[in-house]
Amino acid sequence: MSDSGSSSGGLLTYETLVHAVAGAAGSMTAMTIFFPLDTAKSRLQVDENRKSKSTPVMLAEIAKEEGLLSWYRGWFPVISSLCCSNFVYFYTFNSLKKMTASGMHKSRPGKDLLMGIISGAVNVILTTPMWVVNTRLKLQGVKFRNEDLHQTHYTGIFDAFLQIISNEGVRTLWNGTLPSLILVLNPAVQFMFYEAMKRKAGRGGRKISSAQIFLIGAIAKAVATTATYPLQTVQAILRFGQYRSDGTSGVLGSVSNIFSLLMDRIRKHGVLGLYKGLEAKLLQTVLTSALMFVIYEKITAVIFKVMGLNKKLQHS
């Protein structure tokens, strides 16, 4: 990612807005292309009783039982959430880069990681309600093999918000917040590796090709996803809202609920059960992230070039 350039350190700048819009556009385009893989991942995470263990088999089952269009069930709420989420993340990350531009050469990976963690925390607090709703809508109408999972009946995003607030309380919109806060390490590690590999590839003023950006983005996301996947599974279950611990739902995903879910998963499926759906997740998230970075870099480069800002926005 290019630095935001000028010495001014304000949050409301044209450059950071371009980064945020480009990041949101890139993620929306990439997610739309690879959305069926996200559908398979969600089913493997939440519906434990399915025998399907591979992405192709899961997608074939969904198509057979529910039709091909089911691969894109919940597309709009997911894309809406992703757009907001990536806008917030890219805006915050690039604003922090702009404000800390002086002295950034020292311990750069460590600062990238810290900025990623802060950006992730801001993103989680602001956008978790949208992700809770999108998880509910994405799994609505699904033919679950697990009889303990109950169907929801929402007519859309706003109806889902209203029903959750009236029936379960406002705090339910922040279900899974704790694992989500822990999972800010995922994008933070991803961006740290991405920035470090991109700086190395562009050393000496060398131009970085789209193929290199794709590969760098894929490697960075694969490392981050594999390291944090068990918590991503817990996050999905808590957001779906049907887990119960001591008779109550895990409103903020308390430490005890997270631990209980992890142990329950291990008891039922073994340690490898913590990684159920990882194949689909890696396929989806690695390909999506890699393509997102390519689109993001192209959009920012074109806009900055057209607006005559490319000379001010050099890699540090």
Image: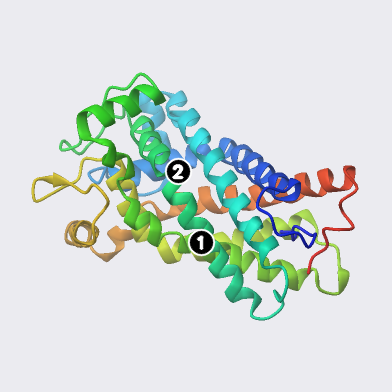
Q: Which mark is residue 67?
A: none
Kindly identify the residue that appears in the image at 46 percent across and 59 percent down.
184
Give x and y (percent) for residue 177: 34, 51
Q: How many marks?
A: 2
Residue 24 against residue 258 in the figure, above or below: above
The extreme left residue here reads 246
Residue closest to the eye, 259 or 265? 259
Give x and y (percent) for residue 84: 54, 40
In three-dimensional space, the C-alpha distance between marks 2 and 1, rounded to whole angstroms, equals: 14 Å
Crowd tier of the residue under label 2, counting other residues whose Cα lies within 10 Å: few below 14, some 14–19, many 20 or above: some
Q: Is mark 1 on a helix, strand or loop?
A: helix
Instruction: Answer yes or no: is residue 52 visible.
Output: no
**What residue is disc 2 on?**
127
Residue 7 against residue 252 in the figure, above or below: below
Kindly indicate the quadrant of the structure image that contains residue 33. top right
Q: Amino acid type of disc 2?
A: Thr
Callout 2–callout 1 Cβ contact below 8 Å? no
Give x and y (percent) for residue 276: 34, 54
Give x and y (percent) for residue 102: 73, 72
In the image, 26: left or right of 143?
A: right
Q: Amino acid type of disc 1?
A: Ile
**What residue is disc 1 on?**
118
Considering the image in quadrants, where does the C terminus appear?
bottom right
Residue closest to the eye, 105 or 203? 105
Residue 38 against residue 211 in the figure, above or below: above
Kindly identify the residue that appears in the image at 56 percent across and 38 percent down.
83
Instruction: Answer yes or no: is residue 290 visible.
Output: yes
Residue closest to the eye, 233 or 69? 233
